[in-house]
Each structure stands twice: as C-alpha cells, then as structure tokens.
Image (cartoon, grey):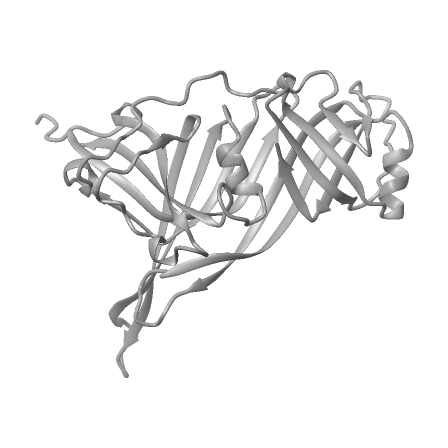
Amino acid sequence: MGLSITPSNSVDQVNPVQYHLEGNVKTAPAEYGVLDTASPGFTAAGRNALLEAVSTPRFEDTRKAGSPSRVLRTKTKEAHRAVLVTQIVNDTLLKWAMLAPNGSGTCEESFTFLKSYYVNQTLTYEIFLGCLPEEGIIRVTNDGLLQLEIQMRCSDIYETQAANGGMTTPSLATDELSGTPWKADDGGSNRLQINSINYYEMGFSVQVSTKYSVTNPSENQKDLHARPVVQDVRGSIDVVRSSLVISNDSLAGTARNIVIVLKAATSTMTLASCVFDDRRGPKHDPNDTTTLTEPKSFTGPTVAIA
C-alpha cells in the first residue's frame, strides 16, 4: 500500500525565521504578546537561523479514594520558551539579547517571531508571541563563525493554517539577510584588549542572563506581561599566555575592561569592570603540543555594543 501523506522535512520551510517589533513592555504594556493582524513588516533573523519551540502545559491531577489510578488531568497553565540560533550579519538581535533594558533596541521591547512551512502540503505558520530574551550567548571557536544563541520566554506559541497566519497583509521576509556571516578574523589584528593591552585568543563566549517580573493572574493560562528587572553578565575566554598580568589580576580580583572587536569598523563589544573568577597555573604536559593558553571565566556588570 502506498503512502497516503507527504512526510515533512527541512526543505518544507517556506520563508526564513523572522521577527517584528510588538512594542515597549514598559511604555506600551498592552502591546506585549499581541499579534499585529493588519500589515506588520517582518525582518529575517540573520542567516541559517534555527528556531525551536518548547511549550509546556501545566496540569493538576485528580484521583479517587480507593483507586491507584488517576481519573482526571486538568490543564491549568501554559509556559512557552523558544531557542534561536543564527549566524550573525548585523548586531540588531545581538543588542536586543545583551544590552541593559533601556528603550529601543534592547530587551525592553518584545518581538513576534514567525516560521512558515508545509505540513502535508498545507502552508502552516508557527507564531511566537511576546518573545523576550532570557539568555543571549555569543560564541566563537578557534576556527569558526560567530554564532548567536538566544533563549527566549514567550507569552504564546501556536501553529495555524489560516491564510497569512491570521494577518491581513503582512510583509514577510522571503530571503535571509544579505551579507557574509561574521567570523573570527573579521575583528582585525587587535581584536581583543584587556585593560588596553592586546592579546591573542583561541575562542571566547559571552552570556547575558535577564530575569523578568512576570504578571500571570490566576485567571490567565498564559503570561499577561513581563518586564526585565535583573541582568547578569558572564563569559569565558581562552587567552594565549604572554605575561603574568591576567594571572595576577585573577588572584587580586582586579576589575578590568575587556574589549572584543566583532567586526572591524562595524561592531565592538565592551565589557566594563570584569573580574576573573579564579587563577589557574599553567600545566606543562610534555606530551601536549598545543599552545599554552589561560582559560579564564569572568563576570561583569554590563555589556556595551557599538
């Protein structure tokens, strides 16, 4: 007997992962998590963007005396999360995920994300409402591209096969953003400075965690509103050892500015007053032929990107 359905696979995606601004959660709270059903304009989320939803319903179980079995499960709430991983061609989403909440372009604004794909030859839209970054992570390996990962909280995530995803005349992005994805050597020859001293590095990552004050009334199954209130900055960097400065700073707890050029003449990340977590002495293994480095983790108060 022949197959009666068309199985889905990756080539069924129609348009790239994309997003549009909902509003400022501080000055326009009523716009949080609300789909613009008129004519919203969407922007592609970088290149080779992957977006995955994780929605978790919450239940209360009912059992009956004298029976070991559950007799009823009642849904009470919903929690929605999503993970975006993308190659970087500009710093718009990077700033949104990492800058301190302060108006336009920061995590004080919520986004609607959208994916479209075919399910058994029927065009389907997956819509992510009320998206706010909980974890923004930029990382680069010694021989790789810069990669941005954003772990988001969302007010709602759902699939629909309604025309245009339930919007009247949306302006959807039909292709990924143009430009070459940023890579390690785009930062130039002096891409890393610690306390205004140039260093070579063999890889780094920076992570910004944002916590939110969430309004979730008892009568609402989904989050009604969220607003950023606390941020933490941490990171790690693998520095080629050239002096005792970083080692001594680690032990003394001396705060230092770390400056990383992500793309020369385009985007520079500054991490002010960072403190290294610990000091680890070098291990001279006679069987190890790799360059001796200082792997350092650190924390800091803020991130600036300009």
> Which residue lies most toward the bottom here?
65
Q: Is residue 145 left or right of residue 160?
A: right
Location of the N terminus by quadrant is top left
Q: Is residue 201 above or below residue 59?
A: above
Q: Quadrant of residue 4?
A: top left
> Which residue lies most toward the left here?
1
State the residue in front, 50 or 212: 212
- Residue 238 image position (x, y, % from top left): 74, 30
- Residue 129 image position (x, y, % from top left): 33, 48
Q: Quadrant of residue 203?
A: top right
Q: Is residue 120 visible?
A: no
- Residue 252 image position (x, y, % from top left): 89, 47
Q: Quadrant of residue 44?
A: top left
Residue at horizontal 52%, vertical 33%? 148
State the residue in front, 41 or 86: 41
Location of the C terminus by quadrant is top right
State the residue in front, 96 or 238: 96
Residue at horizontal 66%, vertical 46%? 302
